[in-house]
Image: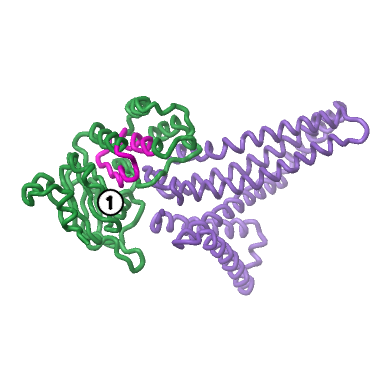
Chain colours: A purple, B green
Amino acid sequence: MLGKLLKYDFKAVGRIMLPMYAAMMVLGIVIGVTARIETGGKTLLSIWMLLFFLLVMAAVILTVYLLVERYYRSLLGNEGYLNCALPVTTLEHIASKVIAALVWMIFGCLAVAVSGLLMGLISTDWQDLVEAAQFIGQRLLHLADNAEALLLFVKLFVIAVLSLTMMVMMVYAAIAVGHLWSEHHILGTIIAFVAFQIVMTIVVMVFDKTGVAIHFAKMTGVVCYTVFWLAVYGTLTWYILDRHLNLE
Amino acid sequence: MSIFECHALTKNYGSVTALDNMDLELEGGRIVGLLGPNGSGKTTLIKIASRLLQPTSGELLIDGMKPGVATKAEVAYLPDRQFLPEWMTTKQLLQMYKDFFTDFDMDKAAEMMASLQIPDRQNIKKLSKGTRDKVQLILTMSRRAKVYLLDEPIAGVDPAARDYILKTILGNYAEGSLVLISTHLITDVEPVLDEAVFLRQGHVILHESVDALRQRTGKSVNDYFKEAFAC
């Protein structure tokens, strides 16, 4: 059932974000071509670049908005009457929302990266490109030799994804807590969010005092810390949605 | 075994008691009217049965099971409000029901949509409120469910639409299943009911077959209701 939930969560966001990513890439191509053919003042290029920057900003804001809106509206708003009556567990609902959020954030980064790559590829001279490719190829080969560096890269990636997941879960937990108030859901959400930050800071301070904090400098420590909070916020969200759901 | 049972079911919202130690047993193959004034606990009972709410104490069993994933697969629930995702098209909605509910009859739903001339790929956002209500009803009644929970299906619609809704319910519910219709518009639903359950302040004050009630009191259910709930 998780797969089916994901299918509809992706459709809901994809219909807005995919055209935006496409526009970003088209603009990437336009910028590349303009950079190649425009001579003199580069006015046109500046305008395209500004547009691209604005589009990326809009995409970032829209992604965050949609991920919050989808979660709120489909589980806690009127659509909750449909979604919460589906033969699906609460855990699957939460997992679907978090996975979709993560994937859209990663897709967003990829769309920007690909657009940038298109700009570079089109605007750069062929000769330079070949040289650059050779240089990167050599570096990559070197990286493959150096297992330690590769491992570090994988670890950093895992930590980045975990931290992002934890942050998404924290936002979803704050929204769930905010919904416990019969009115003023947004205010409740903000208070919950601030309270979470305070609690996390206090926990870190306590750890600092006990001298355990030293372990947090290590990567496994960071992973444990992130997984711990992910579990806390995940459980809190699950508990509220499963046991204290009260749709208006 | 009853298909729908409540045992000492209680639901409190803070200091307000919506359901108070309620006992109720309903059999399959019946159309039951859940009748009571506003605030008598009708919606709360249906929401607990759909697992949108948790009872404070006591239990509610559907087909012998507490509300959960298994009962949701057997219960077709029509809420008392509009719940269709506006970004979807009618076709996507039908597909979604088919994806999630194994008892959903796609052909039947498509046929009902066509008979009402609701466009296949119409965005829900562009449908009128009345049409959305009909789409919701079609989605619910196209399931071969064991229990249909219909919360105020005819409130807020014109008399012509009321007839259509009642006709759709009568003509489409799966044989042997229980249809529970909550309403305060008794005159309209009375002709289709087998049984009536009167709720007042979270209590069942009467549960009787409609024929027996009419015979015993010499009144229509509506007249009896007015008398029972006279202010």
The residue positioned 57% from the left and 52% from the top of the image is A168
| Viewport quadrant of the C terminus of chain A | bottom left
Query: SS for tag 1?
Result: loop
Q: Which of the 4 quarters of the picture holds residue A224?
A: bottom right
| Viewport quadrant of the N terminus of chain A | top left
Task: State the extent of the magenta-drawn residues as a range.
Answer: B133-159
Query: Considering only vertical position in the picture, is A245 above or below A33?
Result: below
The residue positioned 52% from the left and 54% from the top of the image is A172
Q: Is residue B6 magenta?
A: no
Q: Dot 1 corresponds to which residue?
A: B66
Query: Considering only vertical position in the picture, is A115 above or below A245?
Result: above
In the picture provided, is A154 more to the left or to the right than B14? right
The residue positioned 23% from the left and 45% from the top of the image is B63
**Could you say where residue A201 lies in the image, as x and y percent from the top left?**
61, 67
| Res. B191 in view | yes
**Could you say where residue A216 lies in the image, as x and y percent from the top left?**
64, 62
**Could you say where residue A177 lies in the image, as x and y percent from the top left?**
49, 60
